[in-house]
Image: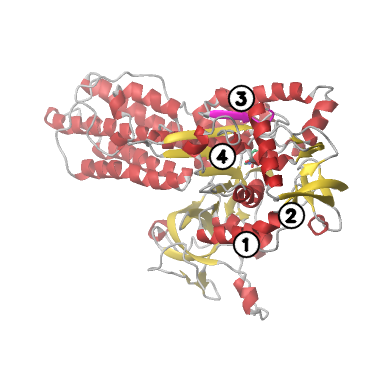
Amino acid sequence: MSKKTFYVTTPIYYPSGRLHIGHTYTTVAADAIARYKRFTGHDVRFLTGTDEHGEKIQKTADEKGMAPIDYLDDIVGDIKKLWQTMEISYDDFIRTTEKRHEKAVQNIFQKLYDQGDIYLGEYEGWYCVPCESLWTDTQVGDDHKCPDCKRDVQKKKESSYFFKLSKYQQRLVDYYNANPDFCFPESRKNEMLNNFINAGLEDLSVSRTTFDWGIKVPFDEKHVIYVWIDALCNYITALGYEGEDSSLMDRYWPSNVQIVGKEIVRFHTIIWPALLMALDLPLPEKVYGHGWILFSEDKMSKSKGNIVYPEPIIERYGIDSLKYFLLREFTFGQDGNYTNRNFLTRINSDLANDLGNLLSRTISMIEKYNDCIIPSPKTSGGFHDELKSIAESMSAKVDSAMDRLQFNEALEEVWKLIRRSNKYVDETMPWALAKDESKKDELDTVLYNLAESLRIATVMISPILHITADKIFNQLGVSEDIRTYESSKAFGLIKEGTKINKGEILFPRLDIDKELGVMEEMFGKKKEEVNELPKEEIKEEKKGKEEITIDDFAKVELKVGKVLEAEKHPKADKLLVFKIKLKDEVRQIVSGIAKFYDPAELIGRNVVVVTNLKPVKLRGIESQGMILSAATEDDSKLVLISAQDIEDGVEVR
Ligand code: MSP
C-alpha cells in the first residue's frame, strides 16, 4: 500500500536581513510537524524558501551598491546556513528568482489573463514600501498610515493589471462554510470572514510599473507581477506546476497544512484560495496562522531594536533547547512573550531537572545495582502498573495534539510520563531495595520499568528533539527497531540483558543569574515584563451598568471550556493560571479566584469563558480570556459558572 502523503509549507522568507527567533518559530514548527508525519509513516514534502522580488529588495541592494541578485545570494546563503545549523529537514528550498519559479509564474499570469481573470485597468491607492501592500483610502485613514506597520504610506497612481478577486467572494464564503477547518485558529477565520470577505472584496492590483525587480508580465514587459502573487505561487511552482515535470504536483497537491504568521493570514486565506479557484486547483486543507513572539509586548523587529537571534542561543544552549522552548513555552496560534528568564527557567526545569535527571538516575542505578545491564521485570501491580498504563496511553494523546499542531500539549503529555517516572523513583526507593537481598526482584522491576518508560518518552520526543533522543537511545543501548513510532505503544520491548552506555549529562543545570548576564551580553539588556493590570480593572464593576442592546451583547463571545491545568500564579497569591481547552484550541487564562478554590479540584471541570476579550497581562502572565463566576458583594463567597455536561468549545448564548 502506498504511503499517505503530507505536504507542509512555511512562508517564503524576505531576505532583507538576518533572521531572528520569531522567524525561526514558523520553521521550527513546520519542521516538527514534517518530522512527526515522517515518523508516523507518511510520505512527506516540506517546503521553505525565500521571497526575493519587490521594491524593498531593490532599494536595499541599491543602497549597498550591489546588484540585487548578488545581494540576495549572500543573504539567502546565510538563511540556508541557519536552517542547516538548526537541522531543519526541508525537502525543497525555493527561491523566487529561480527560473523554474519565474517561468511558471509567467505561465500562470498568462493563463489567468487569457481566461479573463486578469484585465488591464488603472490603480490609485496608497502604497506601503516596507510591507509591499497597497491600501485604499479607508484603510489608511486620515493620517495615511499603513494599517499593518503604522508607517507612512505614499499615494500611487499607475496603470495596472487587476485580478478579479471580487468574482470569488461568494465562492470563498461557501468554501469557508463547507470547510470550517480551512483557516485556523477559529479567531482568525472569523476575522477573515467578518472583516474582509463579508465586508466586500475589490479586484486586486497585480502588477507594477514603478520598479522592475520582479517577474515581468509576459505580454507587457513594462509591468512586473505584484510580489504577493509571485510569492504565493511558490507553493505550487515548487511542485512543478506550469513547469516541465508536474509529477510532484500530482503527488502532493493539495497541501495539508500551510503554516504562516498571523499578519499574513489574509494573503493566504483570501488571495491564495481565490487564485487557486481561478486556476481550477484544489485548496489547501488548512492554513494555520500562528501568533507572534513578542518582546516586551512588541513584535520582534529590527526597527524596534529588540531582536533575539538564534545562533548565539544554539551555540551556548544547543539546538534542542531552543526548539523545545519555542514549541513548549507558547501556545501555537497565540502570541507569546519572550524573556531570557523564561527561556532559562524552562530549560532548567523541563530539560535539566525532569528529563536529564530521569536519564542520569536511571543510568546510574542500572550501572550501580546491575552492572550496566538492564534486568527483566519480575513483579507487577501498584506503582509499576500505574507507570506502565501512563506510558502505554501516552502516544495516542501526543498524536491527537500533534494533529491539531498543539506542540505544547504534545510535549506536556510526554512530560507527564517523565515526571511520573521521577516520582516512581521516589515512591519505589531503589536505593533501599538494593540494601535488601530479598528485594532483588522488586529492584529489577523498577530498573526495567524506568528504562522502558524513558525509552517510550524518548520515542515520542524523537521527531521534535532528535539530537537529544539519539543521545538517550544510545545511553540506554536500545536497538533501532524499538525507536520507532509503532514501538511507542507497547510497554516491555527492551530486551533483558541490554547493556547501557553511560554518557555525558544531557542538559547541565544552569545558574540562572549567571546565564542572564551571559544573555544580556549576547543581545543587550532588555526590559523584563512588569506589566500589570491596574487594580481597578481586576475588580469587578459594582455599580449598575448602562442598558445595552442585544447587538451589544452579541459582541461577547462565550464558550464552554474544559480546565486542563490550573496552578497558582508564581507572583500573585490571589491569582490562578489556567490552561483551558476550547475544542481545538488551548487558552491560558489568569483568574482572581485563588482564595476560593484549590487549583487541583478544578482540573477537568467545564466552565464558561469569554473568548473574544482582548488579552491582558496579569502580573506578567498573559490572560487570553475570562472565566465567568458569581461572587457576593463582599467577596466572601464565589462560585464558578459551570457547564458540566456540555462539550468544550460549544458557544454559550
Ligand atoms: N515573504 C513573506 C511571506 C510570503 S509567503 C508566500 C513574509 N516573510 S517574512 O520573512 O517577513 O516572515 C516569514 C515568517 O516569519 C512569517 O510567518 C512571519 O509571521 C514570521 N515571523 C516574523 N517575525 C515574527 C515574530 N516576532 N514572531 C513569530 N513569527 C514572526 O512574510
Q: Is residue 213 magenta?
A: no
What's the mark number on residue 170?
1
Relative height, residue 225 to residue 540 (above, below): above
Decide which of tag 4 and tag 2 comes sooner along the chain: 2
Q: Is residue 269 left or right of residue 632?
A: right
Residue 64 located left or right of residue 18: right
Residue matched to label 3? 80
What's the residue type where badge 3 is placed?
A: Lys
Residue at image position (68%, 49%) is 115
Give the residue drawn at x 27%, y 21%. Answer: 367
Identify the element where label 2 is drawn. loop
Relative image position of residue 566 (x, y in whole percent): 45, 54
Q: CA distance from mark 1 to mark 4?
A: 46 Å
Labelled disc at residue 112: none
Identify the amino acid type marked 1.
Gln
Q: CA distance from mark 1 to mark 3?
A: 40 Å
Q: Let me know if residue 204 appears in the view.
A: yes
| Mark toward the start of the polypeptide (2 vs 1) | 1
